Image (spheres, grey):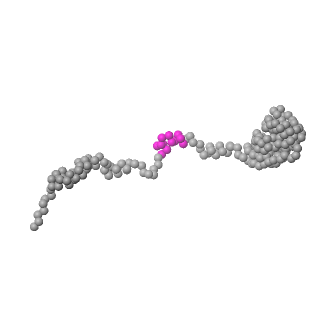
Amino acid sequence: MTVKAAPHEIAIPSVAGIYQRRNPSAGAVLSGALAGKASTAALASGLASKADSDSVISALAAKADSGHSHAIANITSLQAALDAKALATDLTTGLANKAAVETSGSFTGTLTGVTGSVTDSIAYVKFAGLILLTVPDLLGTSNATSCTITGMPVAIRPSTARQLICRVQNGGVFGHGGCSIGTDGVMTLTNGILFAVFSNILGKGIPAQVLPPYAL
């Protein structure tokens, strides 16, 4: 019959001491390896400061779900910020009051009072009852003291004559002048701030520019 020895509880340092006495070199290695390890007491103390699974579950239960909502009143300053925004009806009304381009097009303008034929395309835009003309260079050699541009379509002729300020060329020199648009659509150019006649020599006409809008 084999008799088993009862279990023995021997501290690790004792084991190391016994082993070192029997095998000095190997015992030193074992003692060195065990010296950097945490003791049972230190391990128990470290684990005691950690949250247990029940604590984690309880803490997570108090958190908001990934999908959630809040009432406007629960969010600081949100209602005031929303009140400051424009309503959809305000935007609709505001846009309706803006000037919309009703139509646009172009016509061939012919410069008179010069030698030869001077023509080019004049663009126009109609918006809110106003006409805006974009004139290209219409310049030639003067052979008269008068200067006009013809060719304006009926749709953009004013109901009464309109006087505009523009730049002109007279005697080869650019300066201020005027452009009177008649009910017949003829654009009569004049020279200088006093709307005088032109010289009948050298260069004359109107340089490229956007004229001030005029009412129909």
Instruction: Find residue 178 and report its image quarter.
Output: top right
Instruction: Judge whether residue 159 can be spotted in this image.
Output: no
Q: Nearer the viewer, residue 192 or 29?
A: 29
Q: What x and y, as percent, mark residue 61? A: 37, 50
The residue located at (62%, 44%) in the rendering is 91
Residue pushed farthest front? 25
- Magenta-drawn segment: 71-82
The residue located at (22%, 53%) in the rendering is 29
- For the N terminus, give its image quadrant: bottom left
Instruction: Judge whether residue 94 can be spotted in this image.
Output: yes
Secondary structure that dominates the magenta span: helix
Q: What x and y, as percent, mark residue 182? A: 84, 41
Q: What x and y, as percent, mark residue 67? A: 45, 52
Q: What x and y, as percent, mark residue 168? A: 81, 38
Residue pushed farthest left? 1
Q: Nearer the viewer, residue 13 or 195?
A: 13
Query: Residue 155 lies in magenta, yes or no?
Result: no
Q: Is residue 23 left or right of residue 104?
A: left
The residue located at (42%, 49%) in the rendering is 64
- For the C terminus, give its image quadrant: top right
Instruction: Find residue 193 and report its image quarter.
Output: top right
